[in-house]
């Protein structure tokens, strides 16, 4: 999202502070030994704000990198108090194993609207939400309570709620207010103020005795650390990372390896998530992650991530449902997705509107049910078919020729067997591939051809 002043409204994110030794860490995003999946909370915006929705959205993942939106990428609950909308939702698993959801009280991009409140819901399992309320964080007038995140402070026996506000010096700082029940708070104070504008504090607690706070400074993501959770004890130390203007740092620990991921979000309405990786938080250095390895939920903004069990994952999918559509990502141009534009098939860089141009129903093949046909979501009477070898989106005229042209066999990816390729039904020596970003069917012979003809079927 874009804010007209230097005080960019930034998103908040949870952490998965699982120590490198496998020991459990206390704090935001605390992982349990039984965890094997993740849930993400987010809101949505798109390039023309066609998909601007300021309710609570959820997605799930088994690896923390490729995400499946729930409830067809629609909100699972929508705030009705305050501004009537949310930004930057955050999910915390509390000490009793239940969840609490926090979010900024702001709908849209009315940056001049200040609120001392945040939205709060309770949930046993993220399948239902109860106790909806506004929670007051401080008494400072004329400032905001942006991007809330919570963590357990064992030494205090309380939860700390981090958020961004403007201090008496006129710049953004990370504040903290304490609570035991997420119904009342006390003792608001500055948690981190390095003397310059900072926002979006994301806390990872108890990694080999050190706590890590990532935040946004000057459109980059920077880390600070402390051996205590005392306000004022953190010192910046890391190398800054960014991909253009980047906000909303989210530190996530892999549940299957000793790898940490740092997510960041571009702050324009057409936000794109980027990820970096590290095997050592103490080093403060991050390496960009190949975009082939991760896919954000469609039009997602400013996420919060929490580890969950496989049972919780299964129950969430059963409750909210998997998408009835797919998106196809290009293997060798992983920032691009298959879409129709002017009723022609092509790959274009995400994000774009109308975003339903990139949503497809992979239905049984029109000419052979063991194959697949690509039905458009926003033009459901139209299918991708080849015509003079070029792919275009045409009305199904009911003929056998159309059915044959619109049918493909899904195979193991020609460049990567974990991905997919699609062989033409009636031109079996030809596969769907992109050439100068246009989709067509061609014979495949070279390594470049194989990469052009390989796609990830995801969401």
Image (spheres, grey):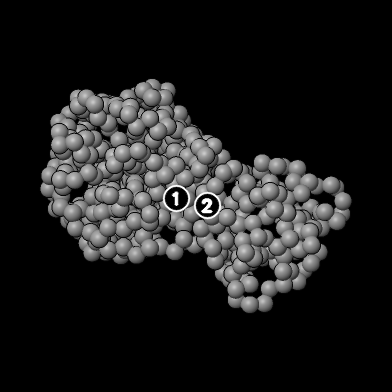
- Which residue is disc 1 drawn over? 272
Q: Which quarter of the rendering shows the N terminus? A: top left
- Would residue 61 be found to the left or right of residue 206 on screen? right
Taking the spot 34% from the left edge, 32% from the top edge, the residue there is 111
**Any part of residue 238 in sight:** yes
Q: Is residue 380 left or right of residue 100?
A: right
What label does residue 350 carry, if any? 2
Q: Residue furthest bottom?
A: 446
Tell how many labels: 2
Q: Measuring 72% from the left and 69% from the top, which residue is drawn there? A: 442
Disc number for residue 99 = none
Residue closest to the eye, 152 or 186: 186
- Dot 1 or dot 2, earlier in sequence: 1
Q: Position of residue 126 (x, y in %)?
A: 43, 37
Q: Are marks 1 and 2 in contact (CB under 8 Å)?
A: yes
Q: Is residue 167 above or below residue 279?
A: above
* Residue 238, quarter of the rendered image: bottom left
**Which residue shows up at 22% across the image and 24% down it?**
141
Is residue 293 shown above or below 147?
below
> How packed is label 2: few (under 14 Cα within 10 Å), some, or many (20 or more)?
many
Residue 56, percent from left and from top: 44, 35
Instruction: Tell me where residue 181 sits by quadrant.
Output: top left
């Amino acid at each position: 999202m874009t804010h007209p002043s230097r005080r960019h409204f930034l998103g908040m994110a949870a952490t998965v502070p699982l120590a490198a030794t496998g020991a459990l860490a206390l704090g935001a995003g605390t992982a349990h030994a039984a965890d094997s999946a993740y849930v993400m909370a987010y809101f949505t915006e798109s390039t023309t704000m066609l998909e601007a929705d300021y309710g609570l959205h959820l997605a799930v993942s088994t690896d923390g990198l490729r995400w499946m939106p729930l409830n067809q990428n629609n909100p699972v609950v929508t705030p009705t108090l305050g501004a009537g909308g949310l930004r930057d939702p955050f999910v915390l698993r509390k000490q009793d194993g239940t969840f609490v959801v926090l979010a900024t009280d702001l709908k849209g991009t009315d940056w001049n609207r200040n609120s001392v409140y945040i939205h709060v819901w309770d949930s046993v399992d993220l399948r239902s939400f109860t106790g909806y309320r506004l929670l007051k964080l401080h008494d400072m007038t004329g400032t905001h309570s942006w991007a809330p995140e919570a963590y357990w402070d064992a030494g205090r026996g309380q939860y700390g709620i981090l958020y961004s506000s403007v201090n008496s010096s006129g710049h953004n700082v990370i504040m903290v207010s304490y609570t035991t029940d997420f119904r009342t708070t006390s003792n608001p104070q500055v948690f981190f103020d390095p003397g310059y504008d900072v926002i979006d504090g994301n806390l990872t607690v108890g990694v080999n005795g050190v706590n890590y706070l990532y935040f946004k400074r000057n459109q980059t993501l920077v880390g600070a650390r402390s051996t205590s959770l005392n306000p004022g004890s953190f010192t910046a130390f890391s190398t800054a990372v960014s991909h253009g203007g980047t906000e909303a740092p989210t530190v996530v620990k892999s549940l299957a390896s000793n790898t940490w991921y740092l997510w960041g979000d571009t702050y324009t309405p057409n936000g794109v998530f980027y990820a970096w990786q590290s095997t050592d938080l103490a080093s403060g250095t991050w390496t960009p992650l190949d975009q082939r390895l991760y896919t954000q939920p469609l039009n997602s903004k400013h996420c919060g991530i929490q580890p969950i069990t496989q049972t919780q994952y299964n129950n969430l999918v059963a409750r909210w449902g998997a998408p009835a559509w797919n998106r196809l990502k290009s293997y060798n141009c992983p920032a691009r997705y298959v879409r129709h534009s002017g009723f022609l098939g092509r790959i274009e860089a995400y994000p774009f509107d109308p975003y339903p141009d990139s949503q497809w129903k992979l239905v049984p093949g029109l000419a052979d049910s063991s194959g697949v046909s690509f039905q458009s979501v926003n033009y459901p009477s139209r299918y991708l078919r080849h015509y003079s070898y070029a792919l275009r989106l045409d009305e199904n005229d009911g003929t056998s020729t159309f059915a044959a042209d619109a049918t493909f066999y899904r195979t193991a990816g020609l460049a990567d067997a974990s991905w997919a390729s699609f062989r033409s039904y009636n031109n079996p020596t030809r596969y769907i591939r992109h050439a100068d970003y246009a989709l067509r069917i061609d014979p495949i012979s070279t390594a470049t051809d194989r990469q052009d003809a390989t796609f990830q079927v995801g969401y």
